[in-house]
Image: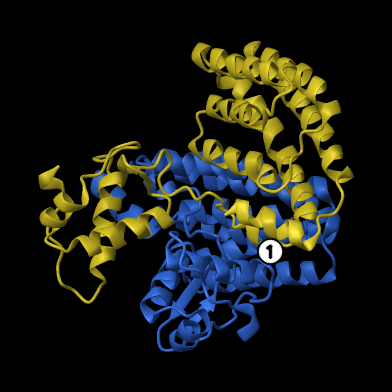
Chain colours: A yellow, B blue
Amino acid sequence: MEKDLKPVKRTPKLLAEQVAGQITDLIKTNKWEAGYKLPNEFEMASLLHVGRGTIREAVKLLVAQNVVEIRRGCGTFVCEKPGMAKDPLGLSFVADKKKLAQDMCEVRLLIEPQIAAIAAERADENHISRVRELCELTEKKILAGEKYAEEDAAFHEALASCTGNQVMMQLMPIIRKGVALFIDVTSTERRAATIEEHRLIVEAVAEGDSAKAAEVMEEHIRKSKINVRDLPGKSHKEDKEKGKTGL
Amino acid sequence: MEKDLKPVKRTPKLLAEQVAGQITDLIKTNKWEAGYKLPNEFEMASLLHVGRGTIREAVKLLVAQNVVEIRRGCGTFVCEKPGMAKDPLGLSFVADKKKLAQDMCEVRLLIEPQIAAIAAERADENHISRVRELCELTEKKILAGEKYAEEDAAFHEALASCTGNQVMMQLMPIIRKGVALFIDVTSTERRAATIEEHRLIVEAVAEGDSAKAAEVMEEHIRKSKINVRDLPGKSHKEDKEKGKTGL
């Protein structure tokens, strides 16, 4: 790791930015992978021939860019998805959250059925068992009357992984969690239906039936969409509150 | 503006983060809109009862989050799309740029024909003239033998705007510029074809023929896709270089 970091030059460019740049490059070239624990402030400072303040500032920049995360008491680690923003589209800055939720559903309706179809074509055994696993996990939560948004999201993300398409895998969390960032779309009457619909999706993918996978996914999203449309408009204050959680 | 900013509390939470939070909220609630010029360091410092160093640090955080931008010699301004990252999906961290370009094209093929179809349904006179304008602008660049990637991107973004769907508008730049971030997909034999294909798209949208709009858009992207597949694999060094430009 010593050889990976070189003393920074005293160029006009901010020292902290140079340090951040070096770290970013090490991650891009997979020398430092997701979950890698960065050397501590003292080590970094001496390796880079800069003050600890500069290291601290560089880390702050990288945290703001979602490249590294600080785990209090543990140290600084490379993020699971380096550079992937919490709210990549800046949707928390969109004022009308109800319209946003409807737009998001329209986008899901446009993308997810096709992702399900491609998943049905490309999914291997591991993919399928992973999807089935998450389907069952979601069911358990629903039947226990617990919140299942996370497991639900993971299920849809697992379907995206079946495509082997990196961009779809990155997009899915955005379009899937985008709404959840602001509004809880899970209504009671949808809970039972979700179980059934998810099962149908899993079976279509397992059978490699892309037409059916797309069809059941479309129905699944259409039904969720209606709930969003039925939502009351958000008050300004609520917008602000929700917005906060969005960033 | 004085009333908008309140002195920050001396809580354990970093002062700079409190300042950044206040500014973010002013933008979210549209008190400070896109392009708004922030008060200078001195004013902010006195309004918030903190040192100029804290203001500077807060601005740095907001710049890293693409919420504000510093225009040298002019001041600090609210970004056009606050919170919208330059590389929202962190794609510059994906090592295999050739596979990435192919994945990106697959996603475009999945999304853009449908966007064109919806655009044909919803576009009003202003939308159509805007799209036509950008189509002609792209043609001029192509015929002049100049780079036209920007105008090309603007053309596709204008189509997304026709849908009136905020999320599609935010997604388009990502899927459109995503490839351009790393690889120049514009090849000579595509230049002439692009003119013709763009014209067909504009006409379909103008006629409100969504089926045709989707069809010509799909053909347009399929042809670009082939070029990407023909690209030579990128060397490790090139990846690093391109990656840099991606962040």
Number of labels in the image equals 1
Q: In front here: B177 or B226?
A: B177
Give the residue drawn at x 73%, y 58%. A239
Q: Report helix, strand or loop for mark 1.
A: helix
Q: Position of residue A97 (x, y in %)?
A: 75, 55
Going by the numbered disc 1, the residue's amino acid type is: Ala
Asked if residue B213 shows in the view, the reply is no
Q: Give x and y (percent) for residue B5.
A: 59, 78
Quadrant hosting residue B3: bottom right
| Residue A192 vertical position relative to residue B20 in the rendered view, above or below | above
Task: From the viewer's perspective, tell me whether residue A215 is left or right of residue B244.
Answer: right
Measured along the vertical axis of the image, is residue A192 above or below residue B178?
A: above
A139 up-or-down from B243: above or below: above
Across and down, in percent, residue B182 comes to 40, 53
Q: Is residue B11 visible?
A: yes
Q: Which residue is the site of mark 1?
A: B158
Residue B216 drawn at (x, y percent) = 71, 48
Task: Tell me the crowding category of disc 1: few under 14, some 14 to 19, or many 20 or more residues within 10 angstroms, Cα based.
Answer: many
Q: Quadrant of residue A33?
A: top left
Tell me the quarter of the image containing the N terminus of chain B: bottom right
A18 relative position to B193: left or right:
left
Q: Quadrant of the C terminus of chain B?
A: bottom left
Horizontally, residue B95 falls left or right of residue B227, namely left
Q: Residue at x 53, y 18 (%)?
A: A127
Identify the residue at horizontal 67%, vertical 27% (top origin).
A148
- The chain ID associated with circle 1 is B
**Left or right, residue A138 beside residue A1:** right
